[in-house]
Amino acid sequence: MIRTSGVGLRHGPLQSFRKIRESDSQLSHAGRRTKELFLKALATPYNRAHHVFAVFTAGATFLLIIAGALVTSNDAGLSVPDWPTTFGSLTKMPHMVGGVKFEHGHRMVAEFVGVLTIILAIWTWRVERRRWLRLLAVAGVGTVIAQGILGGITVLHMLPPAISTAHAALAQTFFCIAVLIALFTGRRWIEEQPRIEFDTRSPSLITLTWLSVFVLYVQLILGAMFRHHGIGWVPHVLHAAVVAFVLSWTAVRALSQFSHVDEVRTPAVTMLSLMIVQLCLGFTAFLTRVAWGHGAVQPELPMVISTVAHVAVGALLLATAIVLAVQVWRHVPVAFEEEVPTVERKAVAA
Amino acid sequence: MATRLQERCSDIMNRKTLAMLGVLALLGLLLLAACSKKNTSEEQSSSPTSESQPPTASTPIDPSTAATVSGTAKFDGTAPKPPKIDMSQDPACKGDNTAETVVVKDGDLANVFVYVKDGLGNRSFDVPKDSVVLDQKGCRYHPHVLAVMAGQNVEIKNDDPTTHNIHPTPKDNREWNESQPPSAAPLQKTFAREEIMLPVKCNQHPWMKMYVNVVKSPFYAVTGPDGKYEIKGLPPGDYTLAFVHEKLGEQDQKVTVAPKDSKTVDTTFKAGGM
């Protein structure tokens, strides 16, 4: 075996194009695919209107998450007992009082976001040359449809914890898709030449960022299960310590090693800030809902505000972690040493 | 060339498989939603027959030997201040805005469900033909604690100028959730199985909560604002009497009644039980 010093492609479609071309002959099938994706990215012109619409869709999705959190926090999930109709009608506006204003309001925002998602997918399909992005936009439509159906099932089955949890988790997954589409259609992503900084430390930053996304997703599921009475608060609170550790580790690594890369520094700082805010909100939500609000005759304003804010900041935190992971994947590829079998090398020399 | 063709084919196949799986997942969810709705409506339409108890001959009780048990539920300690309800979410909701969680007046505790928990053996009893009325008025339930026999009809009325939804969340009975607009016809419902302190709520007005108690015998009562209760027509025997409160829990007492006996059984709930 001979150790050849060099840099291989462990990940990332958008490393320096020159670098990819140099090592073209050594690229695997996956490598060729990523190169193809990169070429298509270069060929895509920036479309301002399309990008603004994608940002608007992501913003509307964030409002939808807040609307959904208001339904749960106000215990209004079953104030409209039927679905897909509302009190037997698809078009008639109900009297928007009590729990109905939260539940039907949530349905109205959801329908609006559904329409936005379909328009975004059609628009993306028409103007976008990156096939993977067109597929991501179509996946967004599939996710929003599945989300609507899950919402219906949970109403018809009187909010079973498993379905309500899936509804909550898929909501934030869809939000992340919307945020990613907004990121990928941005001028900076399309027109910039990525600045490459190779990561030589172990575990790599990309591993840490995906680990952050994973622990956040687990935390999202545990939180949703607690909110929907599937489990107690202990797993969610214990896992918060794990999340805080992993996210801090990731952010510190990103900032200590790659603070000069704007695309890594900004989401890392945002993630760290949001994590601190989220921990404070989690503590407040625990006090208002579990410690002081236990046995309250109705949801009180402090518990509604703290829990809704906790859900909203949680969604922002997950989306930021995913943006960080994607930017690290783009700007900070892993350097590694490639091992070439001696026999093969001899054969080439001969 | 052949390898490239092979890769391309496998690529297309993978995409097709993924697309197919996605479509199948969506279809599955749609099917699940459709089945859910169908099942719910089937359950609702079949509920009167499926929930009715099979007719069994009731055990006759000699009225000339029947005894009476009565008494008072007391609250020991400082009564908690009734929490305020914020009804501002619905302008149609007007009325008393204090919760009925623990209602104490001069030491007497209201809304305690009292029933013969044990001692009746295998006796069976006719289900009363009269309906028990549950009224929604002033965006509150009247009464706050209701008692019925299993299979007995409950008539649910809405006397408010706003829509309510009635949503029992039982452990042993079937859960349902129906809306009732103003001036709508009363809902007729039954509960098939015995269940104590079965919570009922309105998701449109989250402060609206009440409890239904479903028992197999007619020997039960709910304490009034004066804390008093009375159970009549009890055959002579040894019984366990249970006093159940939504917040203060359950207290059991043994009682023996002779023919034509009239016994007084009081109970006291302590403030620390909350």
Image: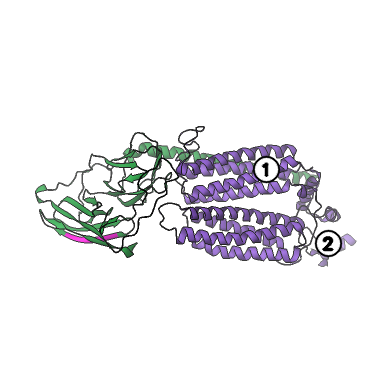
Chain colours: A purple, B green
**Among the two numbered marks 1 and 2 on one chain, the one whose residue lies closer to the N terminus:** 1
Secondary structure state at the residue bearing disc 2: helix
> In the image, is residue A323 above or below residue A259?
above
Q: Chain of mark 2?
A: A
Label 1: how many residues lie within 10 Å, few (<14), some (14-19) or many (20+)?
Answer: many
Q: Amino acid at mark 2?
A: Glu
Label 1 – label 2 distance at C-alpha:
44 Å
Q: Residue at the location (15% across, 53% down)?
A: B68
Left or right: A255 in relation to B182: right
Q: Nearer the viewer, residue A302 or B40?
A: A302
- Residue A312 lies, in percent from the top left, at 58, 52
Quickly name the residue at label 1: A137
Q: Identify the residue at image location x=21%, y=43%.
A: B126
Magenta segment boundaries in residue numbering: B250-255
| Chain hosting mark 1 | A
Q: Nearer the viewer, residue B47 or B20?
A: B47
B147 relative to A291 in the view: left or right: left
In this picture, residue B92 sits left or right of residue B217:
right
Does the magenta portion include A249?
no
Residue picked out by circle 2? A344
